[in-house]
């Protein structure tokens, strides 16, 4: 994975990187009731409003892929993280909705 992370990646690119075994963290910023519906396996789940209080759980050296339902909240979190020293933060375009529709069709769509 390159040193400089793009602001956003596609679900296909994330799937390729996960399949290749790239070191990365998927940060899911959705609420617990959304996580109960579906989630990307192995994600670190921290609701959007709780991210500032949980920065100690995030590693600035490992690529951080930020996920929400459609990519709007996660883009806000990605931009906030970048402003706060996390140059490794990248938004997942289309969020878990695109992931469920295009990559893991076993996941529930809501």
Image: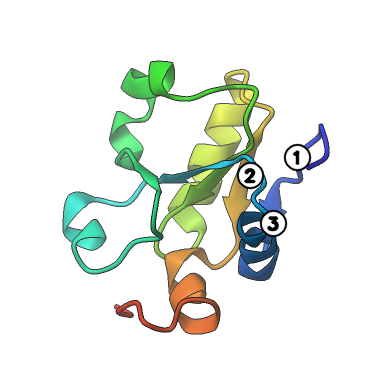
Q: Which numbered disc flags the more N-terminal residue, 2 or 1? A: 1
Name the one closer to the observer, 4 or 14. Answer: 14
Q: Examine the rendered structure and indicate whether residue 109 appears above or below residue 81.
A: below
Where residue 61 appears, as percent x and y from the top left, is 65, 23
- Is 85 left or right of 69, judged from the image as shown? right
Where residue 66 appears, as percent x and y from the top left, is 51, 46
Residue that carries the numbered disc 2 in the rendered image? 90
Q: Examine the rendered structure and indicate whether residue 48 appears above or below residue 34.
A: above
CA separation in Å, label 2 and label 3: 18 Å
Q: Which numbered disc flags the more N-terminal residue, 3 or 1? A: 1
Q: Examine the rendered structure and indicate whether residue 66 appears above or below residue 105.
A: above
Residue depicted at x 32% and y 19%: 53
Q: Do the residues under discs 2 and 3 have CB atoms within 8 angstroms?
A: no
- Is 41 left or right of 37, judged from the image as shown? right
- Is 40 left or right of 53, judged from the image as shown? right
Q: Which numbered disc flags the more N-terminal residue, 2 or 3? A: 3
Q: Do the residues under discs 3 and 1 have CB atoms within 8 angstroms?
A: no
Where residue 63 appears, as percent x and y from the top left, is 64, 36
Residue that carries the numbered disc 3 in the rendered image? 20
Residue depicted at x 44% and y 76%: 100
Q: Do the residues under discs 2 and 1 have CB atoms within 8 angstroms?
A: yes
Quadrant of residue 52 within the rendered picture:
top left
Residue that carries the numbered disc 1 in the rendered image? 5
Q: Quadrant of the N terminus?
A: top right
Task: Tell me the colour scheme of the image.
Answer: rainbow
Residue depicted at x 44% and y 73%: 97
């Amino acid at each position: 994975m390159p040193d400089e992370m793009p602001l956003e990646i596609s679900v296909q690119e994330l799937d390729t990187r996960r399949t290749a075994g790239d070191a990365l963290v998927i940060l899911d910023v959705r609420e617990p009731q959304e996580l109960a519906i579906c989630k990307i396996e192995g994600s670190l789940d921290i609701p959007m409003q709780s991210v500032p209080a949980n920065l100690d759980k995030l590693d600035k050296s490992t690529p951080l892929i930020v996920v929400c339902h459609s990519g709007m909240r996660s883009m806000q979190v990605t931009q906030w993280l970048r402003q706060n020293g996390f140059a490794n933060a990248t938004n997942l375009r289309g969020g878990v909705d695109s992931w469920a529709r295009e990559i893991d069709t076993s996941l529930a769509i809501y």
